[in-house]
Image (cartoon, helix red, strand yellow):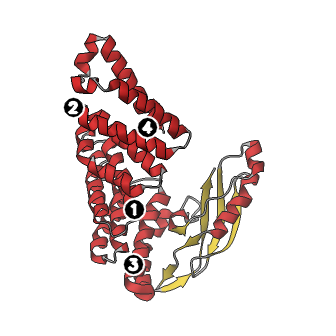
């Protein structure tokens, strides 16, 4: 909705100023043909926003599509306007649960996005991320592979090779290949992501452990519980201490297969309770939480944190190839 409103305001203000101020015509040149459909686009935009706000997405889509088609035919040189209108259509398609069609719009306008944003910009990075999110359910979609590889390239240029953004993108690529059982392709991406994470002096232990944990899951899946467990155990020996907090208790958030979020109780809402809650947990050999006890945090936030911790699941931890119990803490931030 914000994109639609922003685009509407942008178009209206731009074209009002174009008519009123000669100096702006040099800054924002508008082709005569495009100028001839300004009023029609503005009126359609107003109706589109109205339907969108009323959650009448089918009607909004029909008008947004018409706007896009008009701009495609008449506003050839106004690339940013055409891209904005295309993304409006895509956003409405997402609301209509037409993610495949939304992805098709993003894909069709990929070259246009490069021209508008620049290939190595944060905006283009976000554009590619949107493509990936719309493709993520299709594990064997060759387009996803194309987008993910492009995203790695962009993130290395935008955020740097030595960044968590790059490490996380490499991990996503590895997970994609793992889902396809292409283990040999997955391995280099896992190792590159871990190598980057290891070199980063950061207090973001949970994020680093999350990358390591995905590699552990890969080892177990590829080599089986016995051999994979030994490999995971050996791999973690020199790393686990890094993920300890100052009092030597391990923060286990990043080891979760499914980390349940705690609810915010009505009592906590009334007094606006906030802050960090630490829950000490014992995880069994099967990765399920045996017990959970809140050891710090606001009293009105502890019970829901304990319940969430108990419902969470973790990868089993192996020592010498055998699953063992693990004790540590889960940290929730309200």
Residue under circle 1?
136
The residue shown at (58%, 65%) is: 249
99 shown above or below 16? below
Residue under circle 2?
77
Q: Earlier in the sequence, mark 3 or mark 4?
A: 4
For the residues labelled 1 and 2, the Cα–Cα distance comes to 33 Å
Residue under circle 4?
3
Can you tell which of label 1 and label 4 is closer to the viewer?
Answer: 4
154 shown above or below 176? above
Which quadrant would residue 138 be assigned to in this image? Answer: bottom left
Judged from the image, the secondary structure of the residue bearing numbered disc 3 is: helix
259 and 193: which is toward the camera:
259
Q: Is residue 284 visible?
A: yes
Q: Earlier in the sequence, mark 4 or mark 2?
A: 4
The reply, left or right, for residue 202 in relation to residue 192 is right
Q: Earlier in the sequence, mark 1 or mark 4?
A: 4
The reply, left or right, for residue 242 in relation to residue 28 is right
Can you tell which of label 3 and label 2 is closer to the viewer?
Answer: 2
The residue shown at (41%, 86%) is: 224
Can you tell which of label 3 and label 4 is closer to the viewer?
Answer: 4
The reply, left or right, for residue 302 in relation to residue 141 is right
For the residues labelled 3 and 1, the Cα–Cα distance comes to 22 Å
Q: Position of residue 118 (x, y in %)?
A: 24, 40
Q: Earlier in the sequence, mark 3 or mark 2?
A: 2
For the residues labelled 1 and 4, the Cα–Cα distance comes to 23 Å
Residue under circle 3?
219
For the residues labelled 4 and 2, the Cα–Cα distance comes to 21 Å
- Asked if the residues shown at circle 3 and circle 2 are in contact, with their CB atoms under 8 angstroms apart, the answer is no
């Amino acid at each position: 909705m914000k994109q639609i409103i922003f685009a509407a305001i942008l178009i209206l203000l731009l074209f009002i100023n174009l008519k009123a101020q000669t100096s702006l015509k040099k800054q924002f040149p508008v082709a005569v043909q495009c100028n001839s459909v300004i009023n029609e686009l503005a009126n359609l935009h107003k109706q589109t926003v109205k339907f969108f706000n009323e959650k009448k997405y089918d009607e909004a889509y029909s008008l947004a599509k018409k706007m896009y088609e008009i701009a495609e035919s008449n506003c050839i040189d106004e690339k940013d306007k055409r891209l904005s209108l295309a993304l409006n259509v895509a956003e409405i398609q997402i609301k209509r649960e037409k993610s495949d069609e939304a992805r098709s719009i993003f894909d069709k306008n990929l070259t246009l996005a490069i021209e508008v944003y620049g290939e190595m910009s944060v905006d283009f990075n976000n554009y590619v991320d949107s493509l990936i999110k719309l493709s993520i359910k299709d594990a064997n979609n060759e387009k996803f592979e194309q987008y993910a590889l492009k995203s790695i390239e962009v993130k290395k240029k935008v955020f740097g090779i030595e960044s968590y953004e790059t490490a996380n993108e490499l991990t996503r690529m590895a997970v994609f290949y793992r889902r396809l059982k292409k283990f040999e392709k997955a391995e280099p991406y896992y190792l590159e992501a871990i190598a980057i994470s290891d070199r980063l002096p950061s207090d973001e232990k949970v994020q680093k452990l999350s990358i390591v944990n995905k590699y552990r899951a890969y080892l177990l899946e590829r080599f089986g519980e016995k051999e994979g467990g030994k490999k995971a155990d050996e791999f973690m020996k020199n790393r686990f201490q890094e993920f300890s907090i100052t009092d030597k208790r391990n923060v286990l958030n990043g080891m979760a297969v499914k980390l349940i979020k705690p609810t915010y109780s009505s009592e906590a809402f009334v007094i606006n309770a906030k802050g960090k809650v630490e829950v000490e947990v014992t995880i069994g050999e099967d990765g399920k939480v045996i017990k959970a006890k809140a050891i710090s945090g606001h009293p009105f936030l502890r019970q829901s944190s304990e319940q969430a911790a108990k419902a969470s699941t973790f990868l089993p931890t192996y020592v010498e190839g055998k699953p063992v119990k693990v004790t540590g803490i889960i940290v929730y931030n309200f």
